[in-house]
C-alpha cells in the first residue's frame, strides 16, 4: 500500500483519476494528522522510501500513509487542515449509503478479527471495515490494535479531527460489511455511557471554540482586555485530553525522587501544612497567534487567534516549600536538574499528560512556582485543573500542568511526548521530513508579546471622531517587565507610545513588581489622531521589555512547522468612514 501511486491510493476510496487530481490539489499544501508520536512518524523512513521508490509516486504514497494515520485516535494533540477549507473542490463520499449490498455481520463475527493473522476489523456507525493493510502504517504504532474487533467511536471521540470528511472518505475504502441492527443498537447504548468527554464541565457561550474534543477555546479579543484579571469563565481553555473527574476527598499528590522516599499529600494537607501564597500571573499557550503563521504557510496545530492568553490570581502552596518538606536538600540539588509533573488526565491507553521545568525554577525563592488550588479567589474550575495544578509563572502554559497527580525530582526531563516531541521551535527551513526534535530544547520562557484587541480586523472608524482608540495586551516571559508598547496607525511609518495599565481599573496603579518577577501582563490603550488623507488604517503594535527585547516585524522569519512562538508585530486593518454631507 505504501508504494501505490497517488491515484491508485485514491482509487481505493472510489475516486477516479480526475477527482483524485482535484483532491491532491487540496491535500498537497496542508493536510496532516498529528498524533502523540507525530514527530517521529512524520519523518520516519521518509528518505529511505523515496530512495527505494525513486519516484514522485513513492513520496506521494508515503504522504497518503500519513493521512490514513488519522483513522484511529493517537494520544496527542491532532489537527487536520486542507480539504475542509475547500468544500467546492472536495470529492466527498458518503460513509453510509441508504441502500447497501454489503453483507451483514454480527459483533461476535467482527470480534474474531482482532489480529494481523485473522485480519483487523473495526466498526463505525453501523459499517464494518477491514483495516488490516493499514496497521503497519499507523503513526501511533500498535496502539491501533486497541480498536481491533470493536468500535472506532470511543477512540475517535478523543479527537474531533476524525469526524472530518476526508478521514471518513478514506475509511470508506476499507468497508467490507454492515453491522447487524441489534448490535448497532447495543453499541449506541454503550456509547451513551462511555464518552470520555461526558464529564467535561459546561463552558461560557462567548468562547470561540477551536476544538470540542478535547475542548480548546479562547475568549473574543474585545472581551479579553475588558478586565485586567480575566474572569475564570473567559480564561482561555487548553485541554489535551478529557477533563478528569477528581474526588477532593480521595485526592493525593505523590512526590518522588527524594532521599526520604515517596511522599503523599492530601488536598487538605496542602492547604493546612504550607503557607498560602498568592500571585497574579499570565498564562499563554505556545500556539497563541498561530493563525498568523498559517497565513504564511500551513502549520500543524489548533488555529489560535490572539486570545490564547489570560491573566489570573492564583493561590496555593509554594512548590519550593513542598519539595523542602518532602526532603529536598543540597545532595539532591547536586544531581537533579528537573522537576517533572504528571497530570491526572489520561488517554485511552492510560498515558497521562506530562511536562517538566528546570529545578532551579522550581526551587528558587523568587520563582513563585505554586501548587495552586485557587483561581481568582475560588477553588480551581474543572477546566483549569481542579483540585490542584502547577502554576509556573513566566513559563509557557504547557508546563503549567493541570489536575496534578505526581511530582518527580529527576536528573532527566519528562519523557512525555509534550516535553520531548512537541512545543519546540525550529528554523523556517525545517519541515516534517527533516525535523529532529532532540535537536531543540523544550520551550520554557516565552518571548515578548503584544496584540491589538480593539479595534478588530475589518471594522470601521468614523472620520468625525478625529481619532481612533486602540487597546491591547503586552507580556513577556521569564518575569521580564513590559516597559513600552509602540502603536502605529500607518503600518509602522510613525509611532506613538501607549499608556500601560498594570492593575484593575479603579484600583489605582499597582506597584512595580520586583526585578525578574513581572509575571502579569500589562494592558495598554492609546487614542491616535486619524491621518487627514487616509482611507484605511494599518494599525500595528510592538512591545519592549526591560531587557530591551522587542518583537520581530514580520511572521515569515519566525515561521515554524508547529506554529509556536508567534510574536511578530500585530497588524489590524481598519476602514475610515467619511462623514459626508447630503448633496442638495
Image: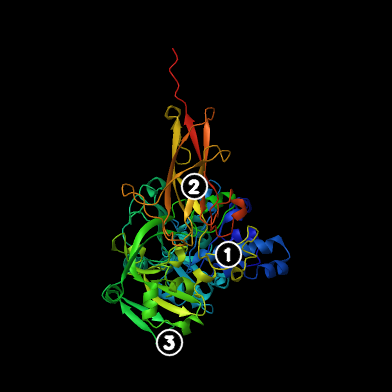
Q: Residues within 10 Å of mark 2 (few under 14, many from 20)?
A: many
Q: Looking at the rendering, in which quadrant would you find the C terminus?
A: top left
Q: Which residue ends up furthest to the bottom in the rendered image?
A: 260
Q: Which numbered tag is attached to residue 66? A: 1
Residue 404's x, y, as percent? 38, 72
Sooner in the amino-acid sequence: mark 3 or mark 1: 1
Residue 95's x, y, as percent? 47, 58
Q: Looking at the rendering, in which quadrant would you find the N terminus?
A: bottom right
Q: Which residue is mark 3?
A: 259
- Please tell me whether mark 1 sits on a helix, a strand or a loop: helix
Q: Residues within 10 Å of mark 1 (few under 14, many from 20)?
A: many
Question: Measured along the vertical axis of the image, is residue 67 above or below residue 21?
Answer: below
**CA–CA distance between discs 2 and 3?**
48 Å
User: Which callout, 2 or 3, points to the residue nearer the camera?
Assistant: 2
Q: Which numbered tag is attached to residue 18? A: none
Q: Which residue is mark 2?
A: 485
- Please tell me whether mark 2 sits on a helix, a strand or a loop: strand
Q: Residues within 10 Å of mark 3 (few under 14, many from 20)?
A: few
**CA–CA distance between discs 3 and 1?**
45 Å
Foreground: 204 or 356? 356
Foreground: 10 or 386? 386
Query: Which residue lies at the image location 59% right of the left edge and 50% below the top edge?
Result: 296
Foreground: 104 or 339? 339
Residue 421's x, y, as percent? 54, 69
- Please tell me whether mark 3 sits on a helix, a strand or a loop: loop
Amino acid at each position: 500500500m505504501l508504494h501505490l501511486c497517488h491515484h491508485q491510493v485514491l482509487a481505493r476510496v472510489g475516486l477516479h483519476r480526475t477527482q483524485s487530481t482535484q483532491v491532491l490539489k487540496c491535500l498537497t499544501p496542508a493536510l496532516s494528522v498529528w498524533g502523540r508520536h507525530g514527530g517521529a512518524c512524520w519523518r520516519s523512513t521518509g528518505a529511505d522510501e523515496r530512495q527505494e521508490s525513486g519516484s514522485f509516486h513513492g513520496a506521494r504514497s508515503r504522504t497518503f500513509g500519513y493521512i490514513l494515520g488519522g483513522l484511529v485516535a493517537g494520544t496527542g494533540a491532532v489537527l487536520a487542515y486542507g480539504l475542509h477549507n475547500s468544500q467546492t473542490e472536495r470529492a466527498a463520499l458518503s460513509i453510509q449509503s441508504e441502500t447497501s449490498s454489503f453483507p451483514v455481520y454480527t459483533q461476535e463475527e467482527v470480534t474474531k478479527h482482532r489480529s494481523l493473522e485473522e485480519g483487523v476489523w473495526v466498526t463505525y456507525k453501523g459499517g464494518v471495515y477491514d483495516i488490516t493493510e493499514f496497521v503497519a502504517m499507523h503513526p501511533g504504532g500498535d496502539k491501533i490494535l486497541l480498536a481491533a474487533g470493536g468500535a472506532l467511536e470511543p477512540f475517535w471521540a478523543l479527537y474531533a479531527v476524525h469526524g472530518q470528511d476526508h478521514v471518513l472518505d478514506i475509511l470508506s475504502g476499507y468497508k467490507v460489511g454492515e453491522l447487524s441492527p441489534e448490535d448497532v443498537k447495543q453499541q449506541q447504548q454503550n456509547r451513551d455511557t462511555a464518552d470520555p468527554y461526558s464529564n467535561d464541565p459546561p463552558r461560557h457561550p462567548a468562547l470561540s471554540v477551536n476544538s470540542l474534543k478535547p475542548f480548546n477555546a479562547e475568549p473574543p479579543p474585545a472581551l479579553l482586555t475588558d478586565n485586567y484579571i480575566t474572569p475564570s469563565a473567559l480564561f482561555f481553555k487548553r485541554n489535551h485530553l478529557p477533563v478528569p473527574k477528581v474526588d477532593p476527598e480521595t485526592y493525593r499528590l505523590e512526590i518522588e525522587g527524594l532521599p526520604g522516599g515517596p511522599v503523599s499529600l492530601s488536598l487538605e494537607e496542602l492547604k493546612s501544612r504550607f503557607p498560602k501564597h498568592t500571585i497574579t500571573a499570565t498564562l499563554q499557550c505556545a500556539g497563541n497567534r498561530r493563525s498568523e503563521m498559517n497565513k504564511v504557510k500551513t502549520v500543524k496545530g489548533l488555529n489560535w487567534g490572539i486570545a490564547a492568553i489570560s491573566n489570573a490570581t492564583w493561590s496555593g502552596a509554594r512548590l519550593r516549600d513542598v519539595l523542602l518538606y518532602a526532603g529536598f536538600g543540597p545532595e539532591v540539588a547536586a544531581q537533579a536538574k528537573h522537576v517533572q509533573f504528571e497530570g491526572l488526565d489520561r488517554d485511552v491507553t492510560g498515558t497521562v499528560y506530562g511536562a517538566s521545568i528546570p529545578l532551579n525554577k522550581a526551587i528558587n525563592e523568587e520563582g513563585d512556582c505554586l501548587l495552586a488550588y485557587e483561581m481568582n479567589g475560588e477553588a480551581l474550575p474543572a477546566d483549569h485543573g481542579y483540585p490542584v495544578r502547577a502554576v509556573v509563572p513566566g513559563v509557557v502554559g504547557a508546563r503549567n500542568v493541570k489536575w496534578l497527580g505526581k511530582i518527580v525530582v529527576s536528573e532527566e526531563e519528562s519523557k512525555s511526548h509534550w516535553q520531548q516531541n512537541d512545543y519546540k521551535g525550529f528554523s523556517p527551513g525545517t519541515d516534517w521530513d527533516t525535523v529532529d526534535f532532540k535537536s531543540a530544547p523544550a520551550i520554557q520562557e516565552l518571548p515578548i508579546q503584544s496584540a491589538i484587541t480593539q479595534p478588530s480586523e475589518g471594522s470601521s472608524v468614523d472620520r468625525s471622531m478625529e481619532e481612533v482608540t486602540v487597546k491591547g495586551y503586552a507580556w513577556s516571559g521569564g518575569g521580564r517587565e513590559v516597559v513600552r508598547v509602540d502603536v502605529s496607525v500607518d503600518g509602522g511609518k510613525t509611532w506613538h507610545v501607549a499608556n500601560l495599565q498594570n492593575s484593575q481599573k479603579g484600583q489605582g496603579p499597582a506597584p512595580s513588581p520586583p526585578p525578574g518577577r513581572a509575571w502579569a501582563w500589562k494592558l495598554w490603550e492609546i487614542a491616535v489622531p486619524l491621518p487627514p488623507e487616509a482611507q484605511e488604517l494599518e494599525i500595528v503594535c510592538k512591545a519592549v521589555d526591560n531587557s530591551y527585547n522587542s518583537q520581530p516585524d514580520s511572521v515569515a522569519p519566525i515561521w515554524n512547522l508547529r506554529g509556536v512562538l508567534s510574536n511578530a508585530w500585530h497588524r489590524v486593518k481598519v476602514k475610515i468612514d467619511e462623514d459626508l454631507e447630503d448633496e442638495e
